[in-house]
Amino acid sequence: MKYIVGIGGMTNGGKTTLTNSLLKSLPNCCVIHQDDFFKPQDQIAVGEDGFKQWDVLESLDMEAMLSTVQAWMISPRKFARAHGVSVQLDASDTHILILEGFLLYSYKPLVDLYSRRYFLTVPYEECKWRRSTRRYMVPDPPGLFDGHVWPMYQKYKREMEANGVEVVYLDGMKSREELFHQVLEDIQNSLLNRS
Ligand SMILES: Nc1ncnc2c1ncn2[C@@H]1O[C@H](COP(=O)(O)OP(=O)(O)O)[C@@H](O)[C@H]1O
Ligand SMILES: O=C(O)c1ccc[n+]([C@@H]2O[C@H](COP(=O)([O-])O)[C@@H](O)[C@H]2O)c1
Ligand SMILES: [Mg+2]
């Protein structure tokens, strides 16, 4: 069985932290990080607001991300080996792929491939504070959060909801441990229901 999990939601919701914990506990589990598909800086548009538009779908090479997902779908075993993931030779033959990123449910060709879509959120103040403690490859210029990051988050979330994309919302204010156990248990139950 092939099972694709989305760990999506807002920037600094805790997606990467949760994903890293899940990876250690789920068998035959590979990961694809959406952040690895940002286009080079010189291909990022500058908006009328003067900010480089990092937080839009066009800043990501989603065709390349889709191809990577398709490579896993064709042969999860080969994909796992190529990415240094040890494959258990048990009878169940379940293969799990986690997609992790802030715009997972806005790209049409991917949206129906998920078995389960999670969406992490924290309140605005917490998100802004956590973001201020982060250092990205390209550091945030002053005003980026309120001028670009937050409005784009709201826009894509509104569109996702208007399109009727079903997600499981997760409260990113819960502790790392609580979130990990909640999602691990939910995935395990969902896998049992399918087998
Ligand atoms: N459940 C949590 N509670 C408090 N802080 C968290 C939690 N999960 C992650 N963090 C912290 O929040 C920041 C963003 O986490 P990260 O996993 O990188 O988020 P994302 O990938 O969604 O941007 C990091 O400093 C991380 O240590
Ligand atoms: O990784 C990069 O090269 C990069 C360059 C510029 C900006 N980012 C930011 O990365 C954010 C998404 O990652 P994350 O972990 O915060 O969800 C997004 O809000 C972007 O503004 C990321
Ligand atoms: Mg991250």
Image (cartoon, helix red, strand yellow):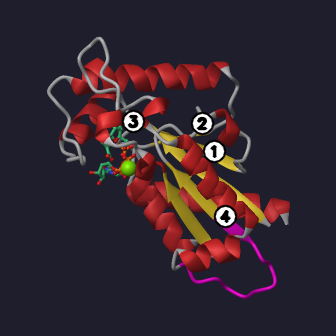
Where does residue 184 sit, x and y in percent of width and height? Answer: 59, 62
Discs 2, 1 touching: Cβ within 8 Å:
yes
Q: Sequence-wise, which precedes: disc 2 or disc 4?
A: 4
Q: Indicate left or right for 109 with 17 as reference.
A: right
Which quadrant holds the N terminus?
bottom right
Which three-letter amino acid code belongs to the residue tagged 3? Val
Ligand 2, seen in the image, is in the quarter at top left
Where does residue 154 sit, x and y in percent of width and height? Answer: 45, 21
Q: Give the residue at mark 2.
A: 105
> Which residue is at the far right?
195
Closer to the camera: disc 1 or disc 4? Answer: 4
Where does residue 114 sit, x and y in percent of width and height? Answer: 69, 48
Q: Give the residue at mark 4.
A: 72
Discs 4, 3 touching: Cβ within 8 Å:
no
Residue name at image x 52 percent, y 68 percent = 23
Check if residue 38 falls in the magenta segment: no
Determine the CA span between mark 3 and mark 1: 17 Å
Determine the CA span between mark 4 and mark 3: 31 Å
Determine the CA span between mark 2 and mark 4: 19 Å
Classed neighbour count for the residue bearing mark 1: other residues with Cα under 10 Å, few (<14), some (14–19), many (≥20)? many
Residue name at image x 58 percent, y 58 percent = 98
SS type, badge 2: loop
Determine the CA span between mark 2 and mark 3: 18 Å
Q: Give the residue at mark 3.
A: 122
